Image (cartoon, rainbow, N blue to C red):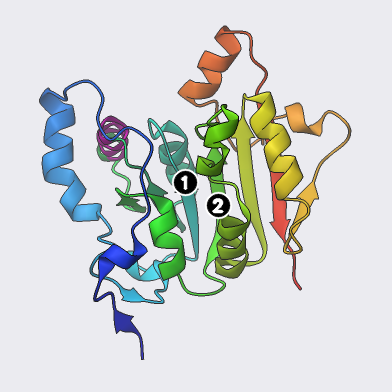
Amino acid sequence: MPKPLSDSSKNRVHLFGRRKGKRLRGSLRQALEHDLPRIRIDADTIDTPCDPSQFFEPKPEKVWLEIGFGGGEHLAAQAKANPHVGFIGAEIFENGIASLLQQSAAAALKNIRILNSDAREFLPMIGDNSLDRVFLLYPDPWPKNKHAKRRFICRAALDQMARIMRPGAEFRIATDHAEYARWCLRHVPIHPAFQWVISGPQGWRQRPEDSIATRYEQKAIREGRTPMYFSFLRNAG
């Protein structure tokens, strides 16, 4: 029988990213105060291991997770295009959360839930074979060598991802940082649970057709950096 999280502190991880940016005003502040409680996942109150589809009504056909959704434009677009999918977005940046809430309300989206804490706290709570797709788009590359341990991609996170993703589920990564791209390719393909899927020698330059350019991607292109896209499938074994 699942047990409630009696001591949430033992699942806490040290947070390195910003929680707040410019002071929120007007409709953004209102969205955060009034809309977030309605669709927020409270990691401190769920039973573990959890079926993430339980956070949606009606129950979705599939559940996709976006880790660090930034301004929320990608997650909102995917939710609009895939109404049969339940979307969980994990983000600690208050301004990005407010932006997604505003976009969700404008499009009357009902299939989004928000985890306003670090995804690394949430992954151990998810039951086995629960997710059908995971996005990690333009994460903080933590470019200094002494900060590399802060990167999301590491063996411990990949082990959790392998456990909670269904066989055949897709893990998408996008970055404009060359060292972070090399870091991903040094870690993900060697994990026994994941297989790199690439369409030709230039496949890593092609954004998936069902995706959109996030504000971070647009900024990277304006500043002369090359976006890179990687797709990994969860092996059946």
Residue 231 in percent (x, y) is at 70, 45
Mark 1 lies on a secondary structure that is strand
Q: Residue furthest top?
A: 223
What residue is at 64 percent from the left and 32 percent from the top?
180
Q: Quadrant of the N terminus?
A: bottom left
Q: Name the magenta segment's main secondary structure.
A: helix
Left or right: 189 as drawn, with respect to 214: right
Is 26 within the magenta? no
What residue is at 75 percent from the left and 41 percent from the top?
185
- How many labels sit on residues? 2
As displayed, is residue 198 above or below residue 191?
Answer: above
Task: Read off the magenta span.
Answer: 94-104
Give the residue type that dot 2 points to. Val
Residue 30 visible within the image: yes
Using the image, tell me which numbered label, if any, was put on residue 134.
2
Residue 108 figure quarter: top left
Residue 4 in percent (x, y) is at 27, 79
As displayed, is residue 223 above or below residue 26?
Answer: above
Residue 110 in percent (x, y) is at 31, 52
What residue is at 37 percent from the left and 54 percent from the top?
13
